[in-house]
Amino acid sequence: MKACQVEQSEEVTNFTLFPLQSCAIQEIKENWVGAAVVSPETVMIRAISSKQRKQILDHPLTQRELCILKMIVDGNNNPEIAKKLYINIGTVKAHIRHIFYKLNVSERAQACVLALRSGLVD
């Protein structure tokens, strides 16, 4: 017997937890940002829209940009990124501008959410 069933549409992924896993619902409600419990057994987690997916495919990030995006998601600020990568802070800012442009976002939090939802970073 399966413990979890996954149904995916363009923008929403539904995870249905079967009775043996129902105790996980409370943990998901408490620990998952952006998750909504639709019924006692179904949890919806928003994925990226088709427009966002197209943006990412049309403007792929370089390996360096992916590295910096991962560091942003991990909570590093610009001086910390510059120090860890042995580059100038101005170079970090330029990379971040390119990342924002390619992801079509205007701030770090938006970039982090999109990066995590799309699977660009873990």
Image (cartoon, helix red, strand yellow):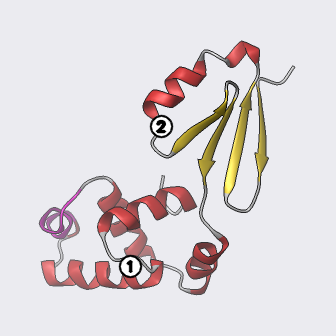
Q: Examine the rendered structure and indicate whether residue 104 appears above or below residue 122.
A: below
- Amino acid carrying label 2: it is Trp
Q: Examine the rendered structure and indicate whether residue 88 appears above or below residue 73.
A: below
Q: Examine the rendered structure and indicate whether residue 7 appears above or below residue 64.
A: above
Residue at x-position 22% and y-position 77%: 92
Residue at x-position 52% and y-position 63%: 120
Question: Residue 54: horizontal and vertical position, in percent?
Answer: 63, 80
Question: Residue 89: horizontal and vertical position, in percent?
Answer: 14, 77
Name the residue that disc number 1 marks.
99
Residue at x-position 67% and y-position 72%: 50
Q: Which residues are magenta?
A: 76-84
Identify the secondary structure beneath mark 2. Answer: loop
Using the rendered view, name the quadrant where residue 6 is placed: top right
What label sits on residue 32 in the rendered view?
2
The quadrant of the rendering that contains the N terminus is top right
Q: In this rendering, would 69 be left or right of 86? A: right
Question: Residue 8: horizontal and vertical position, in percent?
Answer: 76, 51
Using the rendered view, name the quadrant where residue 47 is placed: bottom right
Q: In this rendering, would 104 be left or right of 92? A: right
Residue nearest the observer in this picture, 96 or 53: 53
10 Å crowding of disc 2: few (<14), some (14-19), many (20+): few
Identify the secondary structure beneath mark 1. Answer: helix
Q: Examine the rendered structure and indicate whether residue 36 appears above or below residue 54.
A: above
Q: Assign the magenta stretch its main secondary structure.
A: helix
